[in-house]
Amino acid sequence: MTAEPPVQPPAQPRAVRRPRTPRPSDWRVAVWRTFLRAHARVAGELEHDLTARLGLPLAWYDVLVQLAEAPGRRLRMAELADRVLLSRSGLTRLIDRLQTAGLVRREPSADDARGTFTVLTEDGLARLRAAAPVHLAGVDRHWLRHFTDEELRVLGELLSRVAPDSP
């Protein structure tokens, strides 16, 4: 009877070392610019879909989604700012508008007198539920249909190298 060879853990992808900073004409920089243009185009199309059909800006939708997915449908302002990729001051103004619209409310933290939670209201949840089909149809039309399932899996793996904490 022969012993089984030890199982080796899968190799982790390593960052490729580049000897110099790329020049603007480097093809790799062109790939970066294409990525930025693709992101801007898809985000713009999603924004148009949501505002034209529901009068809901994409940034509002993003905040509502983050709150809906959070425990208790509430997040501290700092955590919400990290999740939606806005500056804290930008988020404060956005939350002011969402609160005026009745979609969120602010609650003081019971544990920290300086802390504030943003909480999704029932109206906010209803607005999110109405917007989700429009948004998801747009994601399909403007992004998913351009790739096979295998390409999306590979793209997800590649992008997770840059944003490893993404779901």
Image (cartoon, helix red, strand yellow):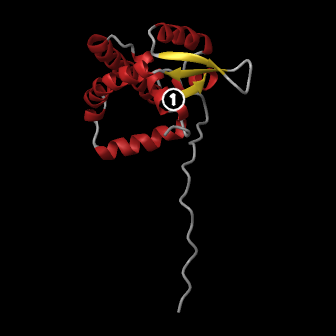
Residue at horizontal 40%, vertical 17%? 58
Please say if 63 is above or below 92.
below
**Is the residue marked by circle 1 packed among few (<14), some (14-19), or many (20+) residues within 10 Å?**
some
Residue on which disc 1 sits: 73
Comparing 146 with 24, the one in front is 146
Query: Is 74 left, or right, of 38 in this rendering?
Result: right
Comparing 162 with 31, the one in front is 162
- Can residue 33 be seen by looking at this rendering? no
Relative image position of residue 59 (x, y in whole percent): 44, 16
Element type where label 1 sits in the image: helix
Q: Quadrant of residue 18?
A: top right
Comparing 59 with 149, the one in front is 59
Task: Give the residue type that dot 1 points to.
Answer: Arg
Comparing 140 with 61, the one in front is 61
Query: Is 67 left, or right, of 39 in this rendering?
Result: right
Please say if 26 is above or below 105.
below
Residue at horizontal 58%, vertical 11%? 92
Residue at horizontal 48%, vertical 12%? 98
- Can residue 148 be seen by looking at this rendering? yes
Relative image position of residue 140 (x, y in whole percent): 28, 31
Relative image position of residue 67 (x, y in whole percent): 50, 27
Query: Is 120 left, or right, of 152 in this rendering?
Result: right
Residue at horizontal 25%, vertical 28%? 141
Q: Quadrant of residue 154?
A: top left
Relative image position of residue 80 (x, y in whole percent): 57, 24
Please say if 10 is above or below 88.
below
- Marker count (numbered): 1
